[in-house]
Structures are given as structure tokens and as C-alpha cells.
Image (cartoon, rainbow, N blue to C red):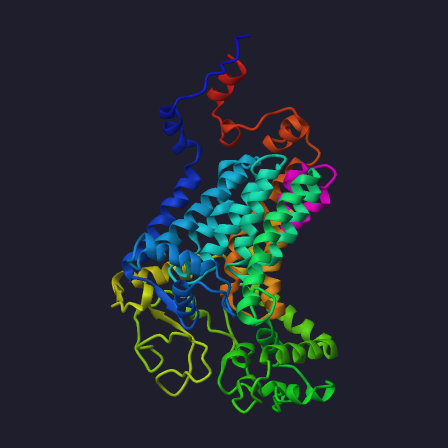
């Protein structure tokens, strides 16, 4: 039998093999890259969302904890404004971040034993989804949020047994995730669960918890020094009030005089949606005749908690309705919900009374109103960039129409995401017979995806925008679940890299995550 050839292939050989070994993922990246390039050309320089984008840009100049949105994305914008003052760097950086997150998911899945087609399937929805591409073109935090938690989970899954350095890095990234969007706080739970399932050493757990906790404690202290309360934000009461107001029956609640001001006397069937109660000037929460000095946040939160305690069935029905909405086949919104069209590629930019001439320095001032009769929250072309510099936005209708058609055709439907999360959870059934790395990965991705739907449904409102992070969680959950179910009951030496490392019969390396041709396999084992 010929001696095993242990020579490492050179760079040229690796580059020659890459297109063949990773052809499906390369095809996904080419299509995703072309769609993003078309978006950059069609809509210059970017999209802005009223009011969120203005708030982020305002905070990028001031870099202080905001009562509504944490500072993470503002720091990202500040860095980009220093690196390149031209505003087009924002969507460019975000498109590249999303592509990079897709590549990272693919590499991690391949390292866990997925073939090139299955690995590409786990990353393709994030790279190709038309609504995901659109949100990357907004001055919004979603893309950075996704990239941060994908990087954190990749660190935990990179090796069979994560060490304290990987756990510490993941903790820092998850803290940054929480400081980019507050619902990222809950992602610590599945990450910690994964480490417990893997039975890592105590110092690994301590590393994750310490590097996650310390930055958040420092931020909470900073927030308290400015706003007088401990937290990452101080608007949770507003959002929770909006969540319960469509069904709250004040006749069932024991309310204080201040809380009574928040009651809507209309029948539930005649009431508005959750967002209306948070933002509209006619909402009881925005009543200018409220006593001076009243803590609206505290009163709103107290009212909401009393409504939930008195009407738990109505609350659960509301939350379950939103979860069910996310898994529906078609993207539809009702009159009480934000329109789904906000994330669709526009074919033109209409002007109207809602189009802001000058963004306010603080968009949440009580005495500020839009030019026009109504306040509207909508997608607009980027009219102001870094440091409030005015921009002349442009659109190419010849590219905009194909992009809109692509988006209608290429996006992950709700049933696909729901079934993918379910498939990841089903892997728990093979806990005793499948490699724990695969079962843990499937559960970590699945639980994280469920939480990304559950948290806004429970504490805020329904919005298709909140579902986009699930694109980076549900497909990898399904792939890890398939790997776990497929490997259950197989001998360790036939389960692929994850099982081989776990059993000690193999060693991770560059060759573990690409498919070998029959000739390469024969040469490697000395066959002939």
C-alpha cells in the first residue's frame, strides 16, 4: 500500500480547487453581489427611514446613550463618517457585511460536516433574499445586528469544543449585539445553553458571561448618569403600552389617576394598532395636558403590566397572532400594522408633505411636528447624510423595476422559516445518538430565531422588518438539524468532522470542510 501523501497543497492548487469545491456558494455570492451592485446604482446614495435613521445620525454626532435606541449602530456610523465622509459608504459597508456573514455561515456549516450544497443552502437565504438586500440599503441597524450575532455564534461553533478565548470573543460580540438592538440581549440565553450542552470547562462559561456582562454594566452606568434610570434604553414602557392598548379593558383594571389617562374609551374593534399608541400625537400617552414632571415611561409600563395581569388570554392571543403572522405564506399587513411596502424597492420617489426639508436635531421633541397635517413614518430617499449635510438623492427607474421584480420573486416565505426553525428543534430528539456539537448548534440557531420573533411580538408590535434577522438563524438551524438527524446512529468515523473530532478519531483542518473528488480521496488514503 503506497505511503500516505501528507504534503500540503500550495496556494495555486487551493485557488484552482476553490471554484469546484465551493461552486454552489460562489454562485450564490455572485447573484447576491450583482443584486447589491444594482441596488447601489439604482438608489443613490441610500434609503432613510423616518424617524429611526435621523435618530441614528443625530446620535452618531453626539455619541451618547439614547432613550430609544442603544449606541452600537451610531458608533458604526461615526466610524464610517471618519473613514469616508461620503454617505454611500453606509450601504456599501452594510452590503459587504451581509455578504461576509453569509460566507461565515457557509464556512461554519462546512466545518460541522455539511456538504457544499447543504452548506450553501444554509447561507443562501441571507445572501439572496430581496427584502434583506433592501434593508441593507437603509440607514438602519439590522445588518450590523445580524453580522454581530453571526460572528458570535461562529466563534462558539468554530471548533468542536470552544475554549475560553472563543467564548470571551463571543461574549463581547453578543454585548455589542445587545447595544445595537436591545432584543439582542436575549441571545445570551441560547449561546449559554450551547456551552452548557457541550459541558465546557467553568472558565469558558465565566469568559462568556464576564465579557458580555462588563460592557453592558458600564453602558447601564453611563445611561444612568445621563437619564437617571438604569437600563440600556428607557422606552420599554412606551412600547409595552402600545402592545396592550388595542385590547386593554380599563373596567377590569385597578388604575391610578395618571394611568386612567392612558385608557382608550373606544371599543377594541375601533381602536388603532400598537404603533399608533406609541408615536401618534393623538395617542393618550402623548397628551400634552398630562401633569408636568410625570414619568410617562413608568406610568405606561405600570398600565401595561396591569393590563397583561388582568387579561392574560387577550395578551397571549395577541402575541400568538403575531407569531402566526410571521409564518404565513404571503406578506400581508392589516390596517393596524406597518405596511409591508416599506421594505420594497420603490420604482419612484414621490414627494409630499411628509418629505422632511430639514431633519430635526432631536426627532422626539414634544413640540416638533412634520411640515404638513399628519405625522408619517416611511421610507424616503436619503436627503441628509453625515453631520446633517444635505444630499440630492437619485433613482434609476430602469434598474429599480427589475429589482422590485426580483424582490417579489426571491425572498424566504414564512412557512420556510417556520419549518426550518422547527427542524432545528427536532434535532433534540437525537440528543443521545448524534454529535452534541450538531444538536447544540441546531438548538442554538433555532431558539435564537424563535426569540427574534417572540420578543417584539411580546413587547412591541408586528413588523416584517423584525423578521429579517431570522434569515441568518432559521436556515443554519435546519442544516445543523439535518446533519444531526442524519448522523444519529452512524459510527463515529462515518459522521464527518463534527463526530470525528468529538470521538477523537479525527482532527479539524482545512480539508475537513470541502468535498473530495474520488481521485483525491484515493490519493489521500493511498488507494490505487
Between 405 and 80, the one lying in front of the other is 80
Q: Residue at x 55, y 46 (%)?
A: 152
Q: Residue furthest front?
A: 225
Left or right side of 147 for 221 = right
Location of residue 281 with respect to 205 vertically, above or below = below
183 relative to 486, above or below: below
| Residue at x-position 48% and y-position 51% | 147
Whether residue 180 can be seen here: yes
Which part of the image, by quadrant, shows the N terminus? top right
Position of residue 80 measured from the top left corner of the image (x, y, whole percent)? 36, 55
Pick whichever, 498 or 482, lies toward us.
498
Q: Magenta segment, which residues?
A: 423-442
Report whether 431 appears left or right of 164: right
Q: Magenta region, mostly helix, strand or loop?
A: helix
> Residue 353 falls in which quadrant of the image?
bottom left
Residue displayed at 33% across by 77% down: 355
Query: 262 or 399, which lies in front?
Result: 262
| Place of residue 414 in the rendered image (x, y in percent of width and height, measured from the top left) | 54, 60
Tell me: residue 50, above or below residue 94: below
**Residue 431 is covered by the magenta coloring:** yes
Amino acid at each position: 500500500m503506497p505511503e500516505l501523501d501528507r504534503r500540503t497543497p500550495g496556494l495555486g492548487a487551493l485557488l484552482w480547487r476553490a471554484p469546484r469545491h465551493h461552486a454552489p456558494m460562489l454562485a450564490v455570492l455572485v447573484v447576491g453581489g450583482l443584486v447589491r451592485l444594482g441596488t447601489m446604482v439604482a438608489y443613490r446614495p441610500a434609503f432613510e427611514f423616518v424617524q429611526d435613521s435621523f435618530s441614528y445620525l443625530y446620535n452618531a454626532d453626539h455619541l451618547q446613550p439614547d432613550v430609544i435606541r442603544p449606541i452600537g449602530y451610531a458608533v458604526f456610523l461615526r466610524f464610517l463618517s471618519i473613514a469616508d465622509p461620503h454617505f454611500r459608504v453606509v450601504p456599501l459597508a452594510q452590503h459587504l457585511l451581509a455578504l461576509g456573514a453569509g460566507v461565515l455561515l457557509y464556512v461554519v456549516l462546512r466545518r460541522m460536516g455539511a456538504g457544499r450544497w447543504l452548506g450553501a443552502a444554509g447561507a443562501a437565504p441571507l445572501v439572496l433574499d430581496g427584502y434583506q438586500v433592501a434593508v441593507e440599503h437603509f440607514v438602519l441597524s439590522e445588518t450590523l445586528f445580524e453580522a454581530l450575532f453571526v460572528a458570535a455564534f461562529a466563534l462558539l461553533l468554530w471548533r468542536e469544543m470552544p475554549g475560553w478565548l472563543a467564548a470571551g470573543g463571543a461574549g463581547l460580540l453578543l454585548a455589542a449585539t445587545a447595544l445595537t438592538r436591545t432584543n439582542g440581549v436575549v441571545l445570551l440565553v441560547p449561546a449559554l445553553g450551547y456551552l452548557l450542552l457541550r459541558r465546557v470547562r467553568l472558565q469558558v462559561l465565566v469568559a462568556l458571561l464576564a465579557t458580555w456582562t462588563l460592557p453592558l454594566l458600564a453602558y447601564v452606568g453611563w445611561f444612568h448618569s445621563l437619564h437617571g434610570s438604569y437600563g440600556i434604553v428607557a422606552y420599554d414602557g412606551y412600547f409595552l403600552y402600545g402592545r396592550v392598548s388595542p385590547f386593554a379593558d380599563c373596567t377590569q383594571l385597578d388604575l391610578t389617576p395618571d394611568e386612567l389617562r392612558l385608557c382608550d374609551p373606544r371599543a377594541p374593534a375601533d381602536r388603532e394598532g400598537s404603533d399608533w399608541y406609541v408615536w401618534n400625537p393623538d395617542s393618550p400617552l402623548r397628551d400634552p395636558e398630562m401633569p408636568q414632571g410625570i414619568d410617562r415611561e413608568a406610568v405606561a409600563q405600570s398600565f401595561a403590566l396591569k393590563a397583561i395581569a388582568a387579561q392574560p388570554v387577550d395578551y397571549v392571543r395577541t402575541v400568538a397572532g403575531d407569531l402566526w403572522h410571521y409564518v404565513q405564506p404571503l406578506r400581508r399587513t392589516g390596517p393596524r400594522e406597518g405596511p409591508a411596502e416599506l421594505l420594497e424597492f420603490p420604482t419612484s420617489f414621490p414627494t409630499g408633505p411628509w418629505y422632511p426639508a430639514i431633519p430635526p436635531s432631536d426627532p422626539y421633541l414634544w413640540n416638533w411636528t412634520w411640515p404638513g397635517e399628519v405625522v408619517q413614518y416611511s421610507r424616503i430617499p436619503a436627503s441628509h447624510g453625515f453631520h446633517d449635510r444635505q444630499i440630492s438623492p437619485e433613482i434609476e427607474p430602469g434598474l429599480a423595476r427589475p429589482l422590485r421584480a426580483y424582490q417579489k420573486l426571491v425572498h424566504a416565505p414564512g412557512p420556510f422559516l417556520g419549518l426550518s426553525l422547527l427542524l432545528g428543534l427536532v434535532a433534540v430528539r437525537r440528543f443521545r445518538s448524534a454529535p452534541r456539537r450538531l444538536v447544540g448548534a441546531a438548538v442554538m440557531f433555532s431558539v435564537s430565531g424563535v426569540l427574534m420573533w417572540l420578543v417584539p411580538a411580546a413587547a412591541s408590535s408586528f413588523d416584517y422588518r423584525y423578521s429579517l434577522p431570522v434569515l441568518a438563524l432559521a436556515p443554519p438551524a435546519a442544516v445543523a438539524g439535518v446533519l444531526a438527524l442524519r448522523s444519529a446512529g452512524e459510527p463515529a468515523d462515518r459522521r464527518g468532522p463534527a463526530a470525528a473530532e468529538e470521538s477523537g478519531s479525527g482532527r479539524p483542518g482545512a480539508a475537513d470542510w470541502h468535498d473530495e473528488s474520488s481521485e483525491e480521496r484515493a490519493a489521500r488514503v493511498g488507494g490505487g
